[in-house]
């Protein structure tokens, strides 16, 4: 809940601390700005004219929730959680460790990590209000925030022990600002060939070969490699329901017309074996 992470949150305009008002029906900053807490439990923290876009819509969010609930990406979530646990072990014991997940979606990865670390609390950040409704309910120690990762993050300086970025965009300059001195960023990037057995017959765009390289170029001057990377790959058997959910949550499928995509999916076998591939990197402030 937002109560558990209020000491981490800040006004997106000027960075002043936030506190709960009227039993946390709204948040207010020291500079007088007020932010209404949605009845679902999340808060939108955006400066100026607000968010430039709304992120994933209800259908994509529902597809992601369905697919992840099937457990097909369990090796990914276990690897991310293990890396965050290792970072938390280096955190001071004076305060409960704090995790920020960027592009947290429905909170699948965030909830698993919080379940695995006693007393840890987390801020789940996503630009989609539809995702935030699920995110707010994913775990009792998670606070859901709607915000744009490309803008100033609505967090205080040096308050976060670990940041997780799972198949999501990053903001290295802001990550450097909000990370504690011992803090690290855990980045899970899809690997070349990820789910290609499904992508190719459907005509869905594959993963760029230089994706990790571009991530490090973007991070230069703000973050540096903190540990050896870990490559993860494993087979998944998908039935038609899982295929539909995976395609429904994939932004790269948006370039295909709905009718064409439906025809291509109908031509697939009842089950298909695909290979999930990703790389986990850990980075620390420069």
Image (tube, rainbow, N blue to C red):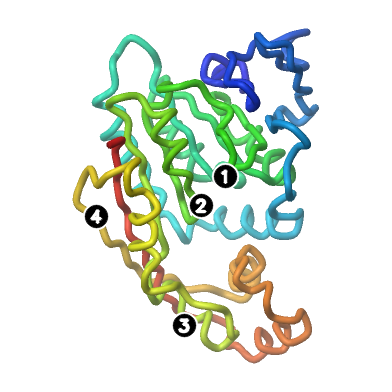
Q: Distance between the residues labelled 2 and 1?
A: 8 Å
Horizontal placement of 215 versus 169: left or right? left
Query: Considering only vertical position in the picture, is 278 above or below 156?
Result: below
Residue at 42% of width from left, 64% of height from top?
190
Measuring 33% from the left and 63% from the top, which residue is drawn there? 213
Residue 97 spot, x, y in % from top left? 38, 22
Comes first in the chain, label 2 or label 4: 2
Whole-number angstrom distance, CA of label 4 to CA of label 3:
25 Å
Crowdedness near tag 1: few (<14), some (14–19) or many (≥20) residues, C-alpha within 10 Å:
few
Residue of label 2? 169
- Of the residues tagged 2 and 1, which is closer to the observer? 1
Question: On the image, which quarter does residue 247 sit in?
Answer: bottom right
Q: Would you say the residues marked 3 and 2 are in contact, meaning their CB atoms lie under 8 Å apart?
A: no
* Location of the C terminus (image quadrant): top left
Q: Farthest front residue? A: 221
Q: Mark 1 points at which residue?
A: 150
Q: Look at the picture and state if 34 lies above or below 112.
A: above
Q: What element carries label 4?
A: loop
Provide the secondary structure element on which disc 3 rests: helix
Give 48 or 40, whichever is nearer the viewer: 48
Q: Is residue 75 visible?
A: no
The residue at 63%/38% (across/down) is 135
User: What residue is disc 4 on?
Assistant: 229
Q: Which mark's residue is nearer the viewer, 3 or 2?
A: 2
Residues marked 4 and 1 touching at CB (< 8 Å): no
């Amino acid at each position: 809940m937002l109560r558990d992470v209020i000491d981490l949150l800040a006004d997106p305009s000027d960075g002043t601390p936030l506190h709960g008002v009227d039993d946390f029906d709204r948040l207010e900053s020291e500079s007088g700005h007020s932010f209404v807490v949605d009845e679902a439990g999340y808060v939108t923290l955006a400066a100026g004219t607000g968010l430039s876009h709304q992120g994933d819509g209800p259908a994509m969010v529902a597809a992601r929730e369905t697919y992840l609930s099937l457990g097909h990406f369990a090796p990914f979530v276990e690897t991310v959680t293990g890396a965050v646990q290792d970072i938390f072990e280096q955190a001071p014991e004076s305060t409960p460790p704090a995790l920020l997940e960027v592009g947290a979606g429905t909170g699948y990865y965030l909830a698993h990590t919080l379940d695995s670390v006693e007393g840890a609390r987390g801020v789940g950040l996503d630009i989609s209000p539809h995702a935030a409704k699920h995110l707010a309910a994913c775990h009792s120690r998670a606070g859901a925030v709607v915000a744009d990762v490309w803008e100033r993050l609505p967090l205080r300086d040096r308050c976060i022990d670990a940041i997780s970025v799972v198949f999501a965009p990053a903001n290295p300059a802001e990550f450097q600002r909000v990370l504690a001195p011992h803090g690290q960023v855990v980045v899970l990037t899809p690997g070349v060939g990820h789910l290609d057995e499904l992508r190719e017959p459907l005509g869905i765009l594959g993963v760029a070969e230089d994706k990790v390289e571009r991530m490090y170029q973007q991070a230069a001057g703000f973050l540096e490699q903190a540990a050896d990377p870990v490559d993860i790959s494993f087979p998944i058997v998908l039935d038609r329901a899982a295929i539909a959910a995976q395609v429904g949550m994939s932004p790269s499928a948006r370039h295909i017309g709905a009718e064409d995509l439906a025809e291509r999916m109908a031509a697939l076998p009842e089950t298909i074996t695909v290979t999930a591939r990703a790389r986990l990197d850990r980075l620390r402030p420069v």
